[in-house]
Amino acid sequence: MTEDSQRNFRSVYYEKVGFRGVEEKKSLEILLKDDRLDIEKLCTFSQRFPLPSMYRALVWKVLLGILPPHHESHAQVMLYRKEQYCDVLHALKVVRCVTEATPQVEVYLHMYQLESGKLPRSPSFPLEPEDEVFLAIAKAVEEMVEDSVDCYWIIRCFVNQLNNKYRESLPQLPKAFEQYLNLEDSRLLSHLKTCSALSKLPYDLWFKRCFAGCLPESSLQRVWDKVVSGSCKILVFVAVEILLTFKIKVMALNSAEKITKFLENVSMLFSNLILNLERKSFGKPDFFIASHSFSDIFTL
């Protein structure tokens, strides 16, 4: 038996007994051993499989541009990142914008505002909608990443990705959601329209905040693996999966307000959502990009 056929046999065996991650981890480790990391291959891997926890922060930092592809530069680049972090933090302390008592996520927000030229004259100024989005994402990342420097840079670059790379795509996601839900369950979509709930669904929570503060951490990490690696369309699939999972409850509600309130608070009740999506996508590398035969819908 050749090495490739042995590996294929092992992959099928691991899948059947529920240990797909064994082969996936080995594949990622091979990619990470390259002197120059292949960004395209890392993106493809992240689209197909959940990243192992021990490598997630490293892969995210590379894909978000925090670290360069070359291994030998990582230590020096992170030193520069830390110096920049300390300089910005020191500036905020000098102007008394932050103190030791300031919550860490608010410190990250003010650092981001200062670097983007949007620091308000007073910390007491009301938050803008984009500030609320930043804080939601910051709170989620803070639970995933221990190091404060890594945490800030991941937040900063993730938010920049949403604001730049996905600027034109995100506003189209509600329409894509409607089209995909129609294909999956037209009766459920009709119910939402009858209740005038379709336009009042928690799209900001789902698409602008990328489910931050909504999904359990382990599920959120898997969703963000796809977002970081280049596909915001996963957000549509997750939103539809939520509706399908709780179809009976949603169909029993008869007002937009009740449906919206239920959906805003329901997602923490289940953690198998992303696993279900991954089962659908296994063996279909283009699932998160085209979703079966629905590629004409998702031209974002």
Image (cartoon, rainbow, N blue to C red):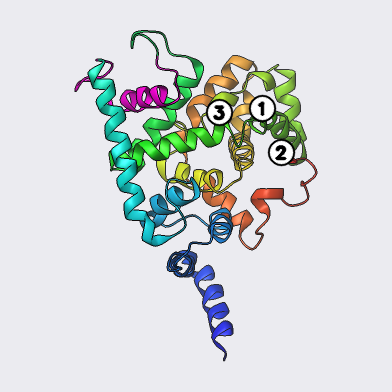
- The residue tagged with tag 2: helix, strand or loop? loop
* Residue 122 rendering spot, x and y as whole percentages: 34, 9
Question: Distance from label 1 to label 3 (Cα)?
Answer: 9 Å
243 or 75, which lies in front?
Answer: 75
Instruction: Say what amino acid the circle numbered 2 marks.
Output: Leu
How far apart are the alpha carbons under marks 2 and 3? Answer: 15 Å
Q: What amino acid does circle 3 point to?
A: Lys
In the picture of the structure, the residue carrying the numbered disc 1 is 171
Residue 102 at least partly seen = no
Q: Which residue is mark 2?
A: 300
* Residue pictured at 51% horizontal, 29% vertical: 209
Image height of 46 relative to 4, above or below: above
**Residue at the spot of label 3:** 208
Task: Bin the neighbour count of mark 1 within 10 Å (Cα to Cα): few under 14, some 14-19, many 20 and up.
Answer: some
Q: Quadrant of the C terminus?
A: top right
Of the numbered discs 2 and 1, the one sitting upstream in the chain is 1
Q: What residue is at 34 percent from the left and 36 percent from the top?
A: 142
Does residue 254 lie above or below 172 as drawn?
A: above
Residue located farthest toward the bottom when viewing the structure as drawn:
1
Q: Are marks 1 and 3 in contact (CB under 8 Å)?
A: no
> What is the residue that sits farthest to the right in this orientation?
296
Circle 2/circle 3 CB separation < 8 Å = no
The x, y position of residue 123, in whole percent, is 33, 12
Q: Is residue 104 magenta?
A: yes
Q: Residue type at mark 1?
A: Pro
Q: Position of residue 62 (x, y in %)?
A: 46, 51
Q: Does 279 sit left or right of 97 as displayed? A: right
| Region rendered in magenta | 96-119
Q: Residue at x 55, y 49 (%)?
A: 229
Work out whether residue 161 can be spotted: yes
Query: Residue 179, located in which quarter of the rendered image?
Result: top right
Relative side of 296 to 46, left or right: right
